[in-house]
Amino acid sequence: MTKVSGKGLRWLLAEIHLWFGLILCAPLVLLGLSGSYLMYHDELDALVAGGPAFEVSDGTSQSVDAIIAVAAAAAPQGFSLRMIRMPDGAGEPVIARIGPDGASFRDPRAKSIAVDPVTLDVLGEVVGGRSLLTGIMHDIHSHALIPGGIGRPIVGWLGVIMLFLCGSGLIIWWPKPRKLWAALTIKRGARGLRLHRDLHGAVGFWTLIVFTIVSFTGVYIAFPNPVASLMETVLMEERSSPPGPPVKAAEGVPEMGLQDAVRLADTVVSDVDFVLAMMPFRPGQPLRVQYNVPGSAEGAPKVTVMIDPWKIDVVKVEDPRAFGRTDMAVAWQRPLHAGVGLGPIWNGLVFISGFLPLLFSITGISMWWIKRRARQKRGRAA
């Protein structure tokens, strides 16, 4: 068997890198741009909706139990409180999601209301909600506009291809020692092929770590269990907090309400601040009650209490304060992908990373096209 030389392997990687990039440039670009958009969709939706700016009273907030009770009482017949989220800061209202009994808080019939945490007044309905554009972007980024559970793994495999493009691109680009600095910069006055090559290589190198992290965390979201198992192998430590058991609706048994769920969750946690409670939005999911750890960064992993709302039983508690390195690595996957938890610099880097597939597609296709035309010109001259 002929041994593949280093040059031959590099050529093979370059060919695979090229054709993956050419064939999949459109979905990869859409995946990146939709991710950047979703980082600021709340602000964009509020701008489009033009709804009222709710004014919250000055003073001390009422108890969480009292706030939830008011939000639940605002639900009309046949509807119930499906989700409640505490404000991120002073001067902001509590947001409650009210929807049909037994439905997901994402149900299109559900509506959001704002509650003043100080006076307990219902301030009104949150106008607009998710805009049409945001809905499309979410569908692109989460399941490639393909319903029925097929789209999510497709998005996951696109993330795997992004990781391959990161690794193969680094190998293809890697210069000789004396040319390293030139490869890390864009030559002044560069034009044509040289400009596209410098942009593709230099930008790719300087953004490699961020782009790799965003791609890897996206793969985790699509394939959480296999990636978590991979982390256990790499970090040589089993998770102390394996996935909780699925829950199942009991026929004829009503689900517990969020107020009772938070009361139950409060009995198994301490030294935390309640932030969110939501009913299951997918079959097999438990009811979730989440708490911030005082002093933790915004977006950092939260204490999560998972409850079976039909058996009225706590099925699992995830507390980042007790995590080992594998549990902590797993818990940080979603915050890292969303650009939260590490401050504004990380947020900005993740936002910019969504535009990288567009840049790489433009420069990569341009290099391919320029070289192709040059080969054709030489062929006609021969």
Image: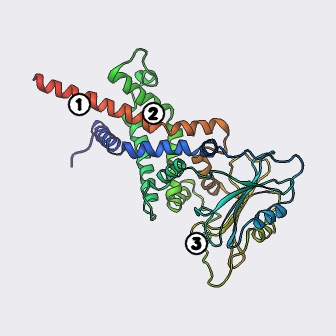
Three-letter code, disc 2: Gly
Question: Which residue is rendered at x = 67% and y = 68% of the image?
Answer: 287
Question: Which residue is rendered at x = 56% and y = 71% of the image?
Answer: 283
Residue 147, how many percent across, how many down? Answer: 44, 61
Q: 300 or 169, which is in the foreground?
A: 300
Label 3: few (<14), some (14–19) or many (≥20) C-alpha neighbours in 10 Å: few
Mark toward the start of the polypeptide (3 vs 1): 3
Is 41 positioned to the left or the right of 276 in the image? left
CA gap between label 2 and label 1 equals 23 Å
Mark toward the start of the polypeptide (2 vs 1): 2
Residue 113, relative to residue 198: is it above or below?
A: below
Is 246 positioned to the left or the right of 316 in the image? left
For the residues labelled 2 and 1, say whether their Cβ atoms are less than 8 Å apart.
no
Mark toward the start of the polypeptide (3 vs 2): 2
Question: Which residue is rendered at x = 66% and y = 37% of the image?
Answer: 344
Write down the residue under mark 2.
204
Write down the residue under mark 1.
372
CA gap between label 3 and label 1 equals 53 Å
Q: Secondary structure under badge 3?
A: loop
Is 185 positioned to the left or the right of 369 in the image? right
For the residues labelled 3 and 1, say whether their Cβ atoms are less than 8 Å apart.
no
CA gap between label 3 and label 2 equals 41 Å
Per the rendering, the mark at residue 284 is: 3
Q: Quadrant of the C terminus?
A: top left
The extreme right residue here reads 59
Residue 332, how many percent across, how many down? Answer: 62, 51
Q: Secondary structure under badge 1?
A: helix
Residue 362, how many percent across, how many down? Answer: 38, 33
The extreme bottom residue here reads 252
